[in-house]
Image (cartoon, grey):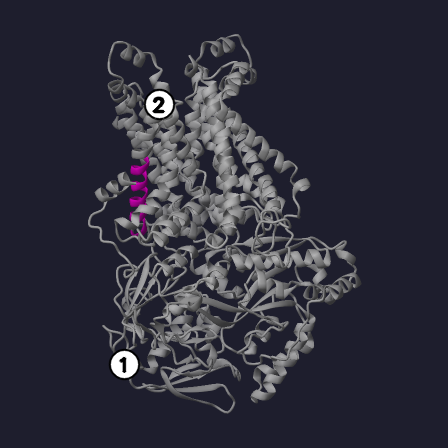
């Protein structure tokens, strides 16, 4: 297994290179630069050129990319051009809130999604199944940016149950977690349902039931474990959405996280921050997926590590 | 998000005769209602110019924010644009984006997936890295920067940009699904037999591989369209969707968001259409999956 | 729901309900709370460029002069000044009772200004704005280019006297010193912090001091008890960073904020609400919104008749009524009210669709036929800018038969493209840096002006501006600018649309907000009695 992990980590290097290179080239090709905002609606080509030089943005693109890689390899992600702050500092300050938010959303999604999925599968095509799946889909057919203000209006302004915005205490967490968790919940519920349905129809489960084991026992002993595998993969994959897709939620509920930071840095063309954020997300994504695959192997020893990518 | 849906689809066994599937679908009322809604929306979108009562960009000066009535069936927005007409044209935008992007993602995804899964080896390694990178990549970054690079100056240009942006982010899910299927099928007896008989790769792919992976792909696409329509709404929220004043449901929702409390109808209509359509595609996808899975019907 | 709460309880410890009081940890009774709409881009007065951050820095840093509620330039850290007969040498005498914030608590000297202003210009400070505001000072260019480290035109004569020499007579020069690039920073604090001004070295002389800065979350200021103008009436200021406008509105209505901006789309509701309607406050700003017709990038705009046809075709009243809910004043000319040179009698080019059609036909495009494809660009992400553009597009289509495309562009990219002069037609704003006609006419439309990126040129206009810029007699100067403005309005390189006005909601217990045309003044007189 150590060899497997080593191999996977080695394979992560080209992935990271690809991510940073794509980010860099797309960022470089898009017109406008962080310098332009600094000039404040002024046409001052001289100052612009000087600042480009000061920030090293006048160097050939490949040199800039090389410089970024060289520094990143030694743990230096550079400095935000807009905010004149170390990128690593921004990450350290703002990542915890996002991680917390994403963690709670995943926990919520797993809890609600798994239970809804299992119940639905056991009640296949009966009322409860239809109802749960309908409810789950309804929650995701509204865009986040509508759901969030709507909930805010109801729970904050009309009912007064929750504080309006901020990230100071548990009551602050309720709405952002609910909104961010809605889509993964729906996903997991549906995935779990179809996965359970399939497992329930496998011969060994049928045999177990036929042998007289209680259905509940079968579900929790055998079916659940096997049905859980694809859900695990999906959880790993939706992490990317939770980390950067949280920008709408972070903006509306004033969560000081990186979701907002990354979108904002793109709008400002703050290259070092864009690079740093995508690198961070990529690293987390790779680590989480590696963990998922290892867990996969533990849950289901039939999966040989070499085969998984 | 497309990925998980695709993986869900991948779990479905393949290879039911199409007639049987159709019969099963017809017996499912949810599937029929969903299909009906989708067809209705598509028809409305196609004949939009015939049944719209005003051009989508006409400002009826002096009739801003008017309530639903005879002059404006569903009322007007704060600029005096006719909501009914804009909803119809919005259906055009939203459905087109959904269909085109899913098809684009389908083409790229299937090509890449087959290359990686069937050819394997170095193809698999390279494409594996690329899909991984695309997965690990913040989607929105791509979309925003693409709009910056392509800098669309016309509504058509902005359509194309949205297509490209969403398709580029969407294909890896499909590629993974197809790769997995191709990997499985590659070692099946009939494929190995064909190969041993000297049948060309291209023929094997089109005759044996593709038909056998069709049903999970179809399901994935149906469900994906719903996701794309929602993604377009998010792009509109960021102000980088289809160019104003051309309406899409997403844009209409965003535009009426500040009116949420004073003119709730403005946000209700497009949200309703968007929600119903997304639901219809999802339910239809589900029903299709059930119909395609013979074991569910034993 | 209950499951969820259970889960949260497990994940987070201690949960008191933070009702109205705490917008980010701090905040007692006598604290003013209003949102920062963006994250502060800089805490350094030498580099600050956006209005929201300037409003924050104004509470902490100060300069020689400041504008007042009557929009005049008045003494601040300078007690008085003398101007040499040729108008080039300004000798300031500093107040004797000005100290930096603790822990430095040192008296501010003329040398501090020498240091601060030079620092703003030095390349290492990386300021994108310093040269724009300080370029009149002799030697500024050399310092900015890195060819000199001392600013030739800036000299501390002794501890209390500072001499500034500028390149030629400029009656508006003092106005430029009200911008933060000329504010004083504390040398020791800055040098201890590797030359940077951030939350660790935000030491000024202003009525408030930095208490806490949580990046991306909030800024807290606390009153400076030893403020030279007397301790401010507030205990502090809380600025939660809230970038979403709906969220700001909710926060205000639920009592988390004392002041907020208003989304115009929501204004009808607010006007009908019995409580909120009484809390509406409106502030005019010295800024003009206009449609710029770029002759360099779009050939038909070289024809004056085409430009005038556009000016006649656009229904400003309808735009103001629908997109801006009648909150602004229509612009007949370039100069907003309150700016030196403003001409209240100016009629401008009236809305006249018939005349517009006629002019367009005369220019060779009857009914809009053969008119090349036109794209109207504007800043992305702001509803009322987009609504304005939609309204303009509709007028051009209905009245001239010209079908334009709309192109929202991200801010950084928009700025670059505007500066490069490649946008054929854009809907944008110019906000005054100082309240003088020079800041609009000579700076933006003179054929030699760097900011004139739209290819407008009229020798008579240039001549009048050149004369007015250095004219001593205010009466004559005003009359010269007014003549120049009439020329440019008739030539129509810009279609001036309206003068900006900001709508805010203030809770009734907030008293003593002082406002000028360039923004709110520092909150020294504000009280909050909740």
Relative to C113, does residue C124 appear above or below in the rendering? above
Up-down: is A7 above or below A93? above
| C7 to the left or right of A152 | left
* Magenta-drawn segment: A93-109
Q: Position of residue C527 (x, y in %)?
A: 32, 74
Between A299 and A47, the one nearer to me in the picture: A299
The label nearer to you, 1 versus 2, is 2
Q: Is residue A137 above or below residue C287?
A: above
What residue lies at 41% left-to-right and 28% top-to-bottom?
A130
Quadrant containing the C terminus of chain A in the rendered view: top left
Callout 1–callout 2 Cβ contact below 8 Å: no
Q: Residues within 10 Å of mark 1 (few under 14, many from 20)?
A: some
Helix, strand or loop at label 1? It is loop
Residue C410 location (% of width, % of height): 51, 54
As drawn, the label of residue A123 is 2
User: Which residue carries the number 1 mark?
Assistant: C107
Q: Is residue C178 magenta?
A: no
Mark 2 surroundings within 10 Å by alpha-carbon count, few (fewer than 14), some (14 through 19), many (20 or more): some
Q: Is residue C140 above or below residue C390?
A: below
């Amino acid at each position: 297994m150590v060899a497997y992990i080593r191999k996977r980590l080695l394979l992560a290097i080209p992935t990271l290179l690809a991510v940073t290179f794509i980010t860099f080239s797309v960022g470089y090709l898009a017109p406008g630069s962080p310098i332009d905002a600094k000039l404040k609606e002024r046409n001052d080509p001289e100052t612009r050129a000087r600042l480009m030089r000061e920030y090293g943005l006048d160097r050939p693109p490949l040199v800039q990319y090389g410089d970024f890689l060289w520094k990143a390899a030694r743990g230096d992600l550079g400095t935000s051009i807009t905010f004149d702050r170390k990128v690593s500092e921004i990450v350290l300050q703002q990542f915890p809130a996002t991680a917390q938010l994403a963690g709670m959303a995943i926990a919520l999604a797993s809890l609600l999604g798994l239970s809804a999925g299992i119940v639905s599968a056991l009640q296949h095509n009966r009322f409860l199944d239809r109802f749960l799946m309908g409810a789950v889909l309804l929650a995701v057919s509204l865009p986040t940016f509508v759901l969030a203000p709507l909930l805010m209006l109801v729970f904050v302004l009309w009912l007064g149950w929750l504080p309006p915005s901020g990230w100071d205490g548990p009551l602050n967490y309720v709405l952002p977690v609910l909104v961010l968790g809605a889509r993964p919940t729906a996903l997991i519920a549906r995935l779990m349902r179809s996965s359970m349905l399939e497992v329930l129809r496998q011969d060994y489960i049928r045999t177990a039931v036929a042998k007289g084991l209680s259905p509940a026992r079968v579900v929790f002993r055998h079916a659940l474990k096997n049905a859980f595998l694809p859900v695990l993969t999906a959880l790993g994959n939706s992490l990317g959405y939770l980390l950067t897709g949280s920008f709408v939620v972070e903006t509306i509920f004033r969560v000081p996280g990186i979701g907002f930071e990354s979108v904002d840095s793109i709008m400002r063309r703050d290259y070092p921050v864009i690079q740093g954020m995508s690198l961070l997300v990529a690293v987390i994504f790779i680590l989480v997926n590696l963990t998922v695959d290892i867990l996969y192997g533990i849950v289901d020893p039939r999966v040989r590590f070499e085969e998984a990518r | 998000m497309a990925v998980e849906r695709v993986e869900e689809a991948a779990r479905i066994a393949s290879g039911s005769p199409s007639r049987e599937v159709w019969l099963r679908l017809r017996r499912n009322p949810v599937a029929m209602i969903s299909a009906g809604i989708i067809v209705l929306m598509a028809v409305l979108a196609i004949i939009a110019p015939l049944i719209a009562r005003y051009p989508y960009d006409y400002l009826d000066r002096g009739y801003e924010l008017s309530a639903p009535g005879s002059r404006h069936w569903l009322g007007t927005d704060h600029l005096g644009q006719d909501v009914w007409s804009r909803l119809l044209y919005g259906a055009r935008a939203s459905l087109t984006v959904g269909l085109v992007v899913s098809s684009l993602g389908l083409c790229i995804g299937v090509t890449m997936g087959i290359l990686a899964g069937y050819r394997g080896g170095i193809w698999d390694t390279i494409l594996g890295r690329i899909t991984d990178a695309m997965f690990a990549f913040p989607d929105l970054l791509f979309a925003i920067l693409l709009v910056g690079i392509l800098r669309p100056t016309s509504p058509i240009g902005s359509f194309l940009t949205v297509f490209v942006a969403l398709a580029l982010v969407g294909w890896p899910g499909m590629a993974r699904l197809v790769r997995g299927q191709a990997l499985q099928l590659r070692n099946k007896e009939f494929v190995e037999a064909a190969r041993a008989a000297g049948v060309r790769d291209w023929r094997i792919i089109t005759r044996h591989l593709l038909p056998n992976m069709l049903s999970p792909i179809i399901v994935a696409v149906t469900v994906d369209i719903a996701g794309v329509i929602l993604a377009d709404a998010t792009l509109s929220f960021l102000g980088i969707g289809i160019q104003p004043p051309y309406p899409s449901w997403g844009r209409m929702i965003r535009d009426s968001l500040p009116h949420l409390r004073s003119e709730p109808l403005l946000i209700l209509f497009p949200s309703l259409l968007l929600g119903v359509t997304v639901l219809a595609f999802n339910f239809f996808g589900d029903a299709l999956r059930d119909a395609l899975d013979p074991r569910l019907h034993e | 729901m209950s499951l969820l709460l259970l889960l949260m309880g497990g994940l987070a410890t201690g949960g008191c309900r933070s009702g109205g009081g705490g917008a980010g940890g701090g905040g007692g009774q006598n604290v003013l709370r209003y949102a920062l709409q963006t994250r502060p881009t800089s805490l350094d007065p030498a580099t600050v460029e956006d209005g929201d951050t300037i409003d924050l820095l104004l509470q902490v840093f100060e300069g020689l002069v400041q504008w007042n509620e009557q929009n005049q330039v008045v003494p601040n850290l300078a007690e008085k000044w003398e101007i040499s007969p040729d108008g080039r040498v300004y000798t300031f005498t500093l107040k004797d009772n000005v100290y930096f914030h603790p822990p430095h608590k040192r008296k501010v000297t003329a040398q501090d200004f020498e240091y601060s202003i030079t620092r703003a210009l030095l390349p290492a400070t990386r300021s994108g704005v310093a040269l724009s505001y300080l370029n009149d000072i002799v030697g500024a260019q050399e310092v900015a280019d890195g060819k000199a480290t001392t600013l030739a035109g800036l000299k501390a004569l002794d501890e209390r006297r500072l001499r500034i020499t500028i390149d030629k007579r400029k009656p508006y020069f003092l106005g430029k010193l009200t911008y933060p690039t000329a504010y004083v920073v504390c040398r020791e604090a800055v040098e201890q912090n590797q030359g940077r001004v951030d939350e660790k070295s935000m030491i000024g002389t202003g009525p408030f001091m930095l208490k806490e800065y949580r990046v991306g979350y909030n800024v807290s200021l606390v009153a400076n008890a030893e403020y030279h103008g007397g301790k401010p009436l507030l205990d502090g200021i809380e600025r939660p960073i809230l970038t979403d406008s709906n969220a700001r509105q909710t926060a205000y209505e639920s009592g988390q904020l004392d002041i907020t901006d208003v989304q115009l789309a929501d204004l009808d509701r607010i006007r009908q609400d019995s409580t909120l309607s009484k809390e509406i406050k409106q502030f005019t700003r010295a800024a003009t919104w206009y449609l710029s017709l770029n002759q360099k990038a779009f050939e038909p705009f070289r024809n004056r008749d085409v430009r005038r046809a556009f000016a006649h075709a656009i229904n400003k009243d309808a735009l103001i009524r629908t997109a801006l809910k009648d909150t602004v004043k229509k612009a007949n000319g370039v100069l907003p009210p309150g700016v030196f040179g403003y001409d209240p009698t100016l009629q401008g080019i009236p809305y006249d669709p018939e005349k517009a059609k006629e002019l367009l036909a005369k220019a060779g495009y009857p009914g809009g036929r053969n008119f090349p494809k036109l794209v109207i660009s504007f800043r992305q992400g702001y509803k009322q800018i987009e609504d304005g553009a939609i309204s303009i597009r509709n007028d051009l289509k209905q009245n001239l038969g010209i079908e334009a495309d709309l192109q929202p562009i991200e801010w950084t990219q928009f700025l670059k493209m505007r500066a490069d002069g490649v946008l054929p037609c854009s809907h944008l704003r110019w906000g005054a840096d100082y309240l003088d006609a020079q800041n609009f006419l000579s700076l933006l439309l003179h054929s030699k002006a760097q900011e004139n990126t739209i290819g407008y040129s009229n020798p008579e206009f240039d001549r009048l501006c050149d004369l007015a810029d250095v004219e001593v007699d205010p009466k004559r100067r005003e009359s010269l600018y007014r003549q120049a403005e009439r020329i440019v309005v008739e030539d129509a390189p810009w279609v001036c649309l309206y003068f900006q006005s900001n709508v805010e909601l203030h809770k009734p217990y907030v008293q003593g907000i002082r406002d000028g045309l360039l923004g709110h003044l520092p909150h020294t007189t504000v009280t909050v009695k909740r």
